[in-house]
């Protein structure tokens, strides 16, 4: 998930000299093209297959292993070898050095590029003065599914380390959990497995996501999870003070109406309940993000996905990732919430003040 790649705050860099500026600008554009080829390699299993081979292989052998056309695979290998990510033997066989194989894991992030780029025409219209304010996830199920991939790997160990309000809640005191903005529901299901004695609810405004979540539930056969379509942004009236724990993963900065959402969350949260929110971690002050390439990457996601979502309907607060950790903390405190611990981290734990 995006926000697990947190950004060290407060990094600044001096103004680049013209020659260095030109070199960085040119190499960034070039690397952008190469990253698209890396995305293809991830999606088609080419990196995975090369990593499994214990000796160099021909383009034909690689193509056969992935059930692909050799000519296209050869072109992909041309790009990857030119970029230095695949090595070649004197007899034209290809391999990734053993010590380098673990680093191809980053190809998973590159696989987001086609999903992000698919929004180009839409985001161009949003930039225009007379264009639409934004767009939501209703036509982006593929993007939602990509964002959901990491959630499938969130086992109990990950939940305890990265999400659970350790020191504030004991597992045996939790009866009801709400995953707000659950998407296709993989994390919600993992939460239900993690807390088998609790009832876990996943809610989302996107109908396609909820339908996919229900399909996932049926496959996993998890009895203590339920998925509910959030209509009119209002949670069930019968849920007032129902939940011991509420999770929001990569959701808070996307909300077009966070005032209403937080008001509803406070209503359904028990007086001693805890909210755990994971959100991308960038500084609210652009100057403090200078030279931070991870922050720059997160702004791309925000421009194409998060900001349009936060402007998709009224009041269209336009937060996006660029909202930043300082503004986020001030917003929560202004809503009568108390932040537990460091308010500048990607994970926020908070409760009613």
Image: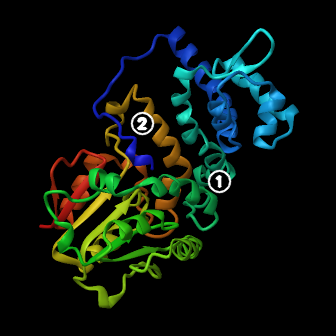
Where is the C terminus found, in terms of image quarters? bottom left
Q: Is residue 181 visible?
A: no
Q: Are marks 2 and 1 in contact (CB under 8 Å)?
A: no
Q: How far apart are marks 2 and 1 (CA)?
A: 24 Å
Give the numbered dot on residue 295. 2
Q: Can residue 28 be seen in this view?
A: yes
Tell me which corner region of the image, top left, top right, bottom left or bottom right, holds residue 78: top right
Q: Is residue 79 above or below residue 1?
A: above
Q: Which residue lies furthest to the bottom in this view?
A: 238
Q: Nearer the viewer, residue 199 or 5?
A: 199
Tell me the residue that label 1 is attached to.
Answer: 125
Give the numbered dot on residue 258. none
Q: Which of marks 2 and 1 is nearer the N terminus?
A: 1
Residue 298 appears left or right of 272: right
| Residue located 22% across and 82% down the image | 241
Decide: few, some or many residues near mark 2? Use Cα within 10 Å; few <14, some 14-19, many ≥20.
many
Element type where label 2 sits in the image: helix
What is the x, y in percent for residue 207?
56, 76
Q: Which residue lies furthest to the front in this view?
A: 54
Colouring style: rainbow
What is the x, y in percent for residue 81?
71, 19
Residue 123 appears left or right of 77: left
Q: Is residue 240 above or below residue 118?
A: below
| Residue located 38% across and 81% down the image | 234
Tell me which corner region of the image, top left, top right, bottom left or bottom right, holds residue 140: bottom right
């Amino acid at each position: 998930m995006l926000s697990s790649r947190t950004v060290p705050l407060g990094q600044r860099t001096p103004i680049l000299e013209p020659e260095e500026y030109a070199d960085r600008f040119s190499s960034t554009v070039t690397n952008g093209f190469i990253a698209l080829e890396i995305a293809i390699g991830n999606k088609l299993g080419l990196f995975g297959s090369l990593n499994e081979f214990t000796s160099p292989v021909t383009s034909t052998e690689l193509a056969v292993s992935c059930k692909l056309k050799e000519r296209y695979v050869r072109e992909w290998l041309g790009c990857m070898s030119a970029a230095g990510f695949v090595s070649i033997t004197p007899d034209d066989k290809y391999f990734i050095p053993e010590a380098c194989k673990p680093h191809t894991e980053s190809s998973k992030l590159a696989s987001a590029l086609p999903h992000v780029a698919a929004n180009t025409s839409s985001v161009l219209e949003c930039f225009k003065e007379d264009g639409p304010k934004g767009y939501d996830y209703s036509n982006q199920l593929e993007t939602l599914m990509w964002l959901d991939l990491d959630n499938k790997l969130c086992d109990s160990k990950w939940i305890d380390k990265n999400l659970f309000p350790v020191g504030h809640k004991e597992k045996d005191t939790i009866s009801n959990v709400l995953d707000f903005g659950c998407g296709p529901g993989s994390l919600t299901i993992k939460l239900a497995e993690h807390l088998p004695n609790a009832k876990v609810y996943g809610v989302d405004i996107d109908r396609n996501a909820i339908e996919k979540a229900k399909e996932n539930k049926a496959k996993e056969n998890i009895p203590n999870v339920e998925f509910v379509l959030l209509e009119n942004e209002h949670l069930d009236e019968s849920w007032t003070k129902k939940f011991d724990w509420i999770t929001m993963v990569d959701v808070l900065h996307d909300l077009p109406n966070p005032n209403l959402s937080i008001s509803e969350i406070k209503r359904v949260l028990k007086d001693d309940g805890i909210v755990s929110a994971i959100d991308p971690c960038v500084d609210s002050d652009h100057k403090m993000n200078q030279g931070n390439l991870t922050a720059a990457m997160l702004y791309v996601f925000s421009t194409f996905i998060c900001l349009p979502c936060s402007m998709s309907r009224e009041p269209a607060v336009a937060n996006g990732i660029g909202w930043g950790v300082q503004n986020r903390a001030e917003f929560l405190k202004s809503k009568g919430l108390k932040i537990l611990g460091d308010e500048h981290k990607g994970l926020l734990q908070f409760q009613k003040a």
